[in-house]
Image (tube, grey):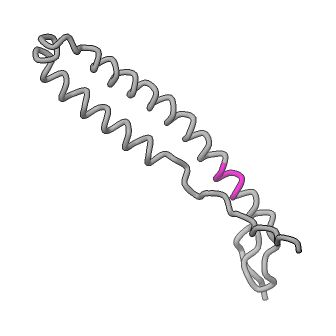
């Protein structure tokens, strides 16, 4: 008895930019709150939390750059695939001019 092949999976359509933006926003807000409470952090010897927020912001900016490039590559690949598809006889051609007649 053989096991049937699993169905072909489609790639995830999420490029991750929104998650990076949310993370950056959260680190920025946390950093601002900690800056306002800096005296309390110094009393507790916990200024390292500001470094955590700074590291989160730095990593988030780097991720944004990488994910933006990934999104551009995905869109370029999708655009090339659409342009390579044959058009219908009655639909607009690659120039968008449509049928003449």
Where in the figure is residue 88, as x and y percent of width and height? 78, 81
Residue sitting nearer the eye, 90 or 17: 17
In the figure, 14 relative to 96: above or below? above
Residue at position x 60%, y 39% in the image: 69
**Position of 69 compared to 64: left or right?**
right
Residue at position x 75%, y 57% in the image: 80
For the image, the number of numbered tags is 0
Where in the figure is residue 87, as x and y percent of width and height? 79, 75
Residue at position x 53%, y 34% in the image: 65
> Which quadrant: the N terminus?
bottom right
Write down the quadrant of residue 66 in the picture.
Answer: top right
Q: Would you say residue 76 sits in the magenta stretch?
A: yes
Q: Which residue is outermost to the right? A: 1
**Position of 37 compared to 20: left or right?**
left
Where in the figure is residue 37, as x and y percent of width and height? 13, 22
Where in the figure is residue 47, as x and y percent of width and height? 23, 14
Residue at position x 48%, y 45% in the image: 17
Residue sitting nearer the eye, 97 or 18: 18
Q: Which residue is outermost to the bottom? A: 101
Overall secondary structure of the magenta section: helix
> Which quadrant: the C terminus?
bottom right
Q: Magenta region: which residues?
A: 74-78
In the figure, 11 relative to 99: above or below? above
Q: Would you say residue 36 sits in the magenta stretch?
A: no
In the figure, 43 relative to 36: above or below? above
Residue sitting nearer the eye, 39 or 89: 39
Q: Which residue is outermost to the front? A: 1
């Amino acid at each position: 008895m053989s096991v049937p092949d699993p169905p072909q999976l489609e790639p995830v359509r999420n490029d991750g930019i929104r998650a990076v933006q949310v993370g950056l926003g959260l680190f920025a807000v946390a950093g601002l709150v900690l800056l306002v409470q800096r005296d309390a952090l110094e009393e507790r010897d916990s200024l390292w939390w500001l470094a955590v927020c700074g590291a989160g912001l730095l990593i988030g900016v780097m991720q944004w750059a990488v994910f933006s490039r990934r999104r551009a590559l995905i869109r370029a690949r999708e655009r090339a695939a659409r342009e390579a598809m044959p058009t219908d006889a009655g639909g607009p051609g690659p120039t968008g001019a449509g049928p003449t007649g």
